[in-house]
Image (cartoon, coloured by chain):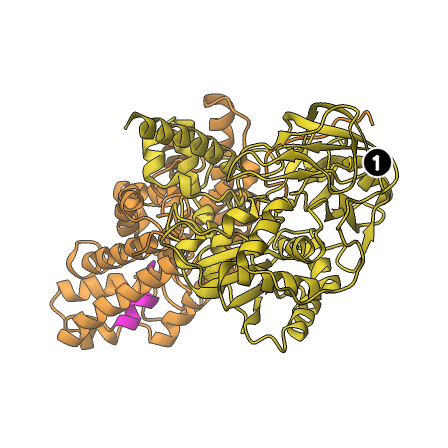
Chain colours: A orange, B yellow
């Protein structure tokens, strides 16, 4: 026998997990929300998404090839995910140059400046979104009218209307008349960022990712559960000052953030308990900003703040060790 | 109800290709190479010399300490030479090479198939026979069995677990043994119970072997002290600590032996060998080896004499397929890749697995995406990603703090990693280095 055999240490078989499978799985999970967005906002939302994806992939390729001088890995799908998430987090009418700039900041600053995939401490899409929100507040809060809404609440988001109303001294019951009902909120019939409107579509994507074991339930349940309980307490304490908890779950970026942004593997904790702490932190900060802060919505900030705590959580929350439990 | 261990675990594709094949006796080879270190512990001391005539069962190397064991000739013939021979570890080790002539057994060994159930021997005499017969754990770890049967002072065994889990993909030798030698395994189990002084034994079998579960349940129907526990299919359930957890719910403390929770675990193959040693005076000179692989013509379960070159087994299974890229001694999760088919079968060889070219190379490593899958599949509750980084950065003290020594090297982390990172390779490096540091520290004190 002259043939040389391959020799390597065990294990000699490999499961079928891969980065590609995970990333394209996430893309697939975002399709329902994308479809709902196209239905409510029209082809504009398709255009914004395609531009964001193309720009993200382009910047990653160029930075890897010409700045980092490594083999480009844009086929792993991670830049596509970042592009879609960035698009999901901006208003439909955003000018093209701003979308491209957002993608440059998301990929260039948020991801590649730290060394690329796996190295970024913050969710890259959120870095891009928050950069745009702070630098271009007017464009980022110019909401395109929802194509299916005949009248009334087109233009402003429910959370925006709530904040404005409270500022001008109205009570909740006065504001509620201007707001979509809970069914519309759940379905996605409201104004808002491109991908965040339809709670039902986002939940569907979340269930798919749970089934495919791309995410675990811990982070989303912790985020949404905390928002629900915290908002519930506020609402019970003063229903004329605070909206009900279901309203808060279905509006703004709560679903998108909890299911797709906070579950980003790279920037969230490794252990299940760590993910619960992380999720509760996001929930609390979100509720604080929404009810007591200057911005109507705060989940983007909440996720970025908790991203910063991830290394700390990883250092202190250790998995349960076998044979070391008293 | 199906039981299993709680923490971590994976489920590789089972590929039990040879499950339906009855055990066949492999014809005797022309020569055998019997290494003197086939077990954990001190190598045995050679007691024969070139030109000596030996029979099957003649002691050719004597146990050289408490954690050591006897090695017997597996064939009759003449000692050709004593030389260093490469075994499945990849290292050359001292071995006795014997030219086979006929098949003559030492006196007093019962080679018939008659089932003997009753014995007047007491625990001490049973132990002595197990020690003399050179029996080691046949699940693959090859820890001398008599050592397991001698609990340290102050510790007593409460339950005997018989490991029929066979959680490694591809392997079917334990499965076939339970189907074909079930009655003997039960007698062996009773002998082990008597030796340990326990009145409870549980045979753990994974649910992917329903025929073995039924067979063993039938055989133990009138044995109130022995029960059969079906287990949910999950790797590494055949690991001692995981099996104890699955069956008894108890966790063996870190760094301790199973006896710390009153458990002693023995493989079904070991129980069979104990039966043969005690009831038939037959030393451990042969074992069942699964020869398998996706391209193998005749995946088989063979009864093979220790020392037989692996190439003979492969020939018996239809020859080495054209597309073979890797040959594994053992299972695909924990087995060792060999460099040549000339290595001999030893007491610990549970299978020979021929892996195809396209499946024999590792995929390219990609960056860690911190998905945490390695953490969630680790059956010991470790953080493989972190231990790998610590080995890369040579942070040995921190690696020790994060319990690198608890790793059982099951490979679930590397198996599951979406970025194809060689987690276990680096953890082994960490274990080796930290182990040395711990020993150095102990010798200083």
Residue shown at 17% from the left, 70% from the top: A234
Residue B326 position, x and y percent, is 71, 35
- Within 10 Å of disc 1 (Cα), the crowding (few <14, some 14-19, many 20+) is few
Is B11 situated above or below A249?
A: above
Q: Which residues are magenta?
A: A245-253
Q: In the structure shown, which secondary structural element does the residue marked by tag 1 occupy?
A: loop
Residue A81 position, x and y percent, is 48, 46
Residue shown at 13% from the left, 74% from the top: A237
Is A193 situated above or below A95?
A: below
Looking at the image, can residue A311 be seen? yes
Looking at the image, can residue A238 be seen? no
Identify the residue under disc 1: B322
Q: Residue furthest left?
A: A169
Residue shown at 69% from the left, 51% from the top: B171
> To which chain does the residue with label 1 belong?
B
Residue B384: quarter of image: top left
For this rendering, which residue is in front, B303 or A99?
Answer: B303
Q: Is residue B316 left or right of residue A138?
A: right
For this rendering, which residue is in front, A272 or A5?
Answer: A5
Residue B317: quarter of image: top right
Residue B350 position, x and y percent, is 68, 46
């Amino acid at each position: 026998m002259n043939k040389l055999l391959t020799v390597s240490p065990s294990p000699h078989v490999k499961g079928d997990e891969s980065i590609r499978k995970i990333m394209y799985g996430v893309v697939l999970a975002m399709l329902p929300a994308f479809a709902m967005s196209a239905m409510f906002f029209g082809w504009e939302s398709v255009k914004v998404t395609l531009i964001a994806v193309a720009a993200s992939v382009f910047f990653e390729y160029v930075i890897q090839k010409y700045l980092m001088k490594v083999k480009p890995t844009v086929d792993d799908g991670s830049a596509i995910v970042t592009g879609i998430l960035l698009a999901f987090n901006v208003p439909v009418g955003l000018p093209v140059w701003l979308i491209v700039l957002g993608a440059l900041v998301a990929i260039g600053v948020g991801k590649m400046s730290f060394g690329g995939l796996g190295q970024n401490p913050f969710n890259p899409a959120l870095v891009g979104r928050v950069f745009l929100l702070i630098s271009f507040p007017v464009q980022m809060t110019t909401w395109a009218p929802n194509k299916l809404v005949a009248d009334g609440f087109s233009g402003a988001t429910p959370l925006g209307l709530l904040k404005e109303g409270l500022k001008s001294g109205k009570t909740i019951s006065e504001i509620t008349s201007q707001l979509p009902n809970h069914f519309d909120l759940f379905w996605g019939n409201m104004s808002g960022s491109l991908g965040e409107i339809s709670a039902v579509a986002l939940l569907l994507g979340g269930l798919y990712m749970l089934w495919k074991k791309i995410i675990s339930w811990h982070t989303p349940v912790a985020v949404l559960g905390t928002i629900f309980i915290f908002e519930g307490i506020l609402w019970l304490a003063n229903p004329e000052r605070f909206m009900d908890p279901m309203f808060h779950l279905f509006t703004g970026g709560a679903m998108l953030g909890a299911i797709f942004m906070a579950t980003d593997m790279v920037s969230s904790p490794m252990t299940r308990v760590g993910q619960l702490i992380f999720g509760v932190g996001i929930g609390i900060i979100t509720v604080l900003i929404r009810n007591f802060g200057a911005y109507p919505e705060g989940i983007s900030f909440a996720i970025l703040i908790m991203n910063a705590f991830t290394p700390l959580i990883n250092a202190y929350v250790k998995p349960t060790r076998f044979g070391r439990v008293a | 109800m199906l039981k299993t261990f709680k923490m971590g675990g994976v489920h590789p594709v089972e590929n039990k290709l040879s499950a339906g094949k009855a055990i066949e006796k492999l014809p005797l080879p022309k020569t055998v190479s019997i290494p003197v270190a086939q077990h954990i512990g001190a190598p045995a001391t050679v007691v024969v010399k070139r030109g000596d005539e030996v029979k099957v069962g003649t002691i050719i190397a004597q146990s050289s300490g408490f954690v050591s064991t006897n090695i017997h000739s597996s064939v009759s013939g003449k000692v050709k030479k004593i030389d260093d021979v490469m075994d499945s570890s990849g290292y050359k080790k001292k071995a006795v090479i014997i030219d086979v002539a006929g098949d003559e057994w030492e006196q007093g060994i019962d080679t018939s198939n008659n089932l003997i159930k009753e014995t007047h021997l007491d625990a001490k005499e049973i132990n002595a026979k197990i020690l003399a017969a050179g029996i080691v754990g046949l699940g693959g770890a090859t820890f001398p069995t008599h050592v397991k049967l001698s609990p340290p002072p102050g510790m007593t065994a409460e339950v005997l677990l018989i490991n029929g889990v066979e959680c490694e993909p591809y392997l079917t030798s334990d499965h076939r043994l339970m189907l074909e030698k079930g009655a003997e395994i039960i007698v062996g189990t009773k002998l082990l119970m008597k030796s340990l002084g326990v009145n409870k034994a549980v045979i753990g079998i994974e649910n992917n072997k329903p025929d073995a579960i039924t067979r063993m349940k039938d055989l133990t129907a009138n044995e109130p002290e022995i029960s059969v526990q079906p287990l949910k299919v999950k790797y590494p359930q055949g690991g001692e600590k995981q099996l104890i957890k699955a069956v008894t719910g108890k966790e063996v403390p870190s760094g301790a032996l199973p006896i710390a929770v009153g458990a002693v675990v023995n493989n079904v193959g070991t129980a069979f060998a104990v039966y043969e040693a005690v009831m038939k005076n037959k030393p451990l000179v042969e074992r069942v080896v699964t020869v398998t692989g996706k391209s193998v013509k005749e995946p088989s379960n063979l009864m093979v004499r220790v020392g037989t070159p692996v190439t003979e087994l492969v020939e018996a299974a239809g020859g080495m397929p054209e597309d073979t890229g890797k040959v594994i001694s053992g299972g695909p999760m924990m087995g060792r890749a060999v460099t040549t088919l000339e290595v001999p079968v030893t007491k610990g060889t549970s299978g020979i697995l021929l892996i195809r070219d396209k499946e024999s190379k590792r995929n390219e490593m990609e960056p860690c995406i911190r998905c945490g899958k390695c953490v969630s599949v680790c059956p010991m509750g470790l953080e493989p990603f972190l231990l790998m980084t610590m080995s890369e950065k040579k942070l040995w003290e921190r690696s020790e703090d994060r319990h690198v020594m608890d790793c059982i090297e099951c490979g679930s982390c590397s198996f599951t990693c979406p970025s194809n990172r060689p987690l276990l390779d680096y953890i082994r490096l960490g274990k080796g280095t930290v182990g040395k540091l711990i020993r150095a520290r102990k010798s200083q004190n």
